[in-house]
Structure formats: structure tokens, C-alpha cells
Image (cartoon, helix red, strand yellow):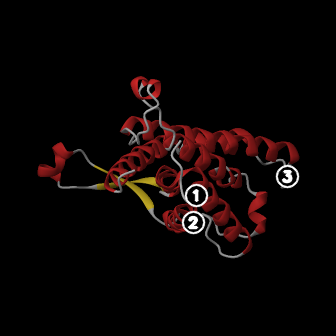
Amino acid sequence: MTRISRPYILVWTIVGLFLTIGANFVPAYIINSPAQWLSQGITAYPLGFKCQVGAVLLVSCLGGRTAGALAQVVYLFVGLVWLKIFNDGGGIEYLQKPVFGYLLAFIPGAWVCGQLAFKQTLPKEAAANSVRTTLKPELEHLGISCLCGLFVIHFFGIIYSIGFKIVDLQQSGNFSLVDSIVSYSVYPLPSQLLLVCAATSIAFVLRRVMFY
């Protein structure tokens, strides 16, 4: 596991906070196939979701588990008590919405993604000879880290929805657990997988540029 200095964690926590806030206002797009660029030009198609999940995973891959998780803690605190930076506003009343579980899940999701992204396995030869070396993560390593982070986000988001249904914070019978899971997990998942690909690619390039 690569050791990360405290100033580095602080910088990436601040960067992660602003990226998470900003990504909530940036719609995600996908462009058409390069084979169509000559005949149709470059066309962007909206995915119907914001880039926030991608930002959470990207920061975790670049800043590590502590910076990634801390950025989300500050983001939730600011959104609950101060600014309306969530998708539907903000405020403490957001706790009474099932979608808040997915925002809360950003914390463990970022931690898991950052933990895996900076977990480096030495080759057998180096490990046997106790050779100290620094390994740069491969593209597939970062991809798996982001996928695991995304899985954790949906897992805890669904758990929150189940608890929301049991407690029935809204005290109404019109809340559907199935509809909630479909709306917040099943339906956005394909688009979020594309965000995983984007976050993985950007993190891979930046970590090569920044030599870590």
C-alpha cells in the first residue's frame, strides 16, 4: 500500500469536494462512433444522468481512500446544513428521501475505490528478495477499483432504501422499494458503467503524468 502524506490528502480532499459539487451540475454525454464522424460529424448524446459518480471514483483513484472519503463527508455536511448542492436541492430534510442513501454511500464507495487503487502487489521475484519498488497501477487495476467502488455505492444505497421502507420516514404507503431500486440502481447503472470507464482512463493517464 502506497503511503500518502497528509498535505497530499488535504489537497485531494479539497479537489474532491469541488469536483463532486461541480459534477452534480454537469450532465454526462456519450459521442457517436468514430466511424460516423466523417459522414455525420461528432454528435453528443445525453445519458440522462450527472457525472457525480464518476467524479467520486476519479478522486478516489487519484487521492486515495482517505481523501476520497473525506471529500464525500464534507460534501454531505455542506449539503445538509448549508448549500443546496444535491440533485434536488439540499437541507436536513434530504435525510427523508430514499436517494440520500446513495449519497451517503459515496463515503464507503470512495474508501473502497481508493483503497484498491493504491494497493500494489509486488512481483514474486521482488517480494522474495525484499526489493523496495514503486508500482504504477495498470489500467485494469484502476478499472476494478472503480467497479468495486460503484458496487459499494449501490449496495449501501439499496440497504438504505430497505431501511427507509421499514421505518417509513414519510409515513405514507406510496413508497415502492422496487421502484426506488429500479430508479436509482437498475436504470442508471449502464450510464454509470460508462462513467467508470471514463474515470478509469483519466485516472490512469493522470497517475502516469504525475509519476505515481
* Residue 10: assigned label: 2
Identified by mark 2, the residue type is Leu
Q: What distance separates the C-alpha of mark 2 from that of mark 3?
A: 43 Å
Residue drawn at x 41%, y 42% is 134
Residue drawn at x 61%, y 48% is 111
Residue 90 locus on image (x, y percent): 68, 69
Residue designated by label 3: 172
Left or right: residue 44 versus residue 24 is left
Q: Mark 1 Cα within 10 Å, few/some/many (few <14, many 20+)?
A: many
* Circles 1 and 2 in contact, beta carbons < 8 Å: yes
Residue drawn at x 85%, y 42% is 166
- Tell me, yes or no, if residue 176 can be seen here: no
Q: Earlier in the sequence, mark 3 or mark 1?
A: 1
Q: Earlier in the sequence, mark 2 or mark 3?
A: 2
Circle count: 3
Residue drawn at x 60%, y 61% is 71
Identified by mark 1, the residue type is Ala
* Residue 178: assigned label: none
